[in-house]
Image (cartoon, rainbow, N blue to C red):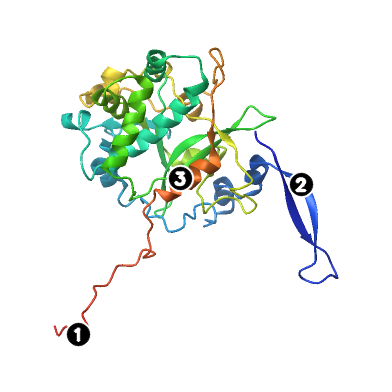
Amino acid sequence: MITIITPIYRITRGVARHSIASLQRTQKFCDIATDTPTLEDNWKTGKVSDKTVAFKNVSMVTPRTFTKFFYNEFKLKFVEEKTKSKPGIELLRNIAANYDYWMVRNNQEHLLYYRLEIMLQRLDYLKTVGLDSKQKLRQIQKSPPPLLFTFTNCSFDAKLVYLRGLLSKPDEEDFIHLFHPITNRITANKITIKQRLQTVESILQIKQPAVIRELLNLPCFFMDPLILRKLNHMFIHRFSMPYHYNFDQHTSPVLPPITNLLKLHISADKHLNNASQNDLLSSLPTYQINELLDTTYSEKNGKGTPECLSSFLLRAEFEEDKDRTSGQPLKGRRGFNVPARQY
């Protein structure tokens, strides 16, 4: 945990408005996060607070369109619903086409963008671990980073988010789960995706089709928003951070999410491939968050490098295509001195 000493100002009584007294206070991101109202508090009071899910000028995915968005953009869909199932985390089915495994298509940025995000985060974590390229590839195939989707709440106006990482507490063994929004439009194009694929190629020493295969075979899960009631979590975005958070002075190390496929009884060839059978996927149970995530973070081969929270938020906000319409439909522009249409 990175601790930063920052000046906090307090307005004294009986003094003019601009006369302030400075105080020195230790600022930690965990302390700032605990003062912010969480989603659990909103369920207890029965009120929905916009402060916890306010993503400014971001075109979001809502429950109205997320099924179609999964099918077209992420090439994912839900397995057939079971008659008896408890709320939990469900594995999503990979429906990518065969040609998606060996080429990067136009207008298909979402297919690889978020998969590349969690893959590069994991590779950066393994940068300071004493493993070569083959050992890193084997480690990722055995314990890949999961792409975990969920909604901010159970309402019809909820926003689609994904698990970006874990934030460890200094005095406790528990973690704060950080969720970042999934934007409907991104600025990354085909050239940007290919450049990041080349980065993965140079690290793992494999060809581009092999990199795409590893990305498309990453386990993708959907978590029931009801689990957020008892989960220590926080929604992060550049414009939705706590009030005292300063990107120039505050940051925090974010640990990448890791899952153990052997522990979950999931095989990459049987359950994560696009040719997986529905019977095998339907036989899998629903998981809990403690079963899905491997939080051991072994230092047997060296200590990993966590991700800088502030750097990620600044870069992620820059790559989002902003929504300037505030959800209002755009009106067609008329030419100069053109009368209104007569219907």
Q: Amino acid at mark 1?
A: Ala
Image location (x, y in percent) of residue 74: 28, 39
Q: Please say if 301 is above or below 53.
A: above
For the residues marked 2 and 3, what is the alpha-carbon distance in whole angstroms? 29 Å
Residue occupying image coordinates x 43% and y 16%: 263
**Numbered tag placed on residue 191 in the rendering:** none
Residue occupying image coordinates x 22% and y 27%: 274
**Numbered tag placed on residue 340 in the rendering:** 1
Q: Are marks 1 and 3 in contact (CB under 8 Å)?
A: no
Q: Using the image as rendered, state which of residue 221 and residue 256 is in the foreground.
A: 256
Residue labelled with disc 3: 315
Q: Please say if 132 is above or below 60.
A: above
Q: Amino acid at mark 2?
A: Arg
Residue occupying image coordinates x 39% and y 54%: 156
Which is more foreground, mark 2 or mark 3?
A: 3
Secondary structure of residue under mark 3:
helix
For the residues marked 1 and 3, what is the alpha-carbon distance in whole angstroms? 44 Å
Q: Amino acid at mark 3?
A: Arg
Image location (x, y in percent) of residue 324: 38, 63
Of the 4 image quadrants, the one containing the N terminus is top right
Residue labelled with disc 2: 25
Secondary structure of residue under mark 2:
strand
For the residues marked 1 and 2, what is the alpha-carbon distance in whole angstroms? 62 Å
Secondary structure of residue under mark 1:
loop
Q: Position of 83 compared to 171: left or right?
A: left
Whichever of callouts 2 and 3 sits on the residue coming sooner in the sequence is: 2
Image location (x, y in percent) of residue 332: 23, 73
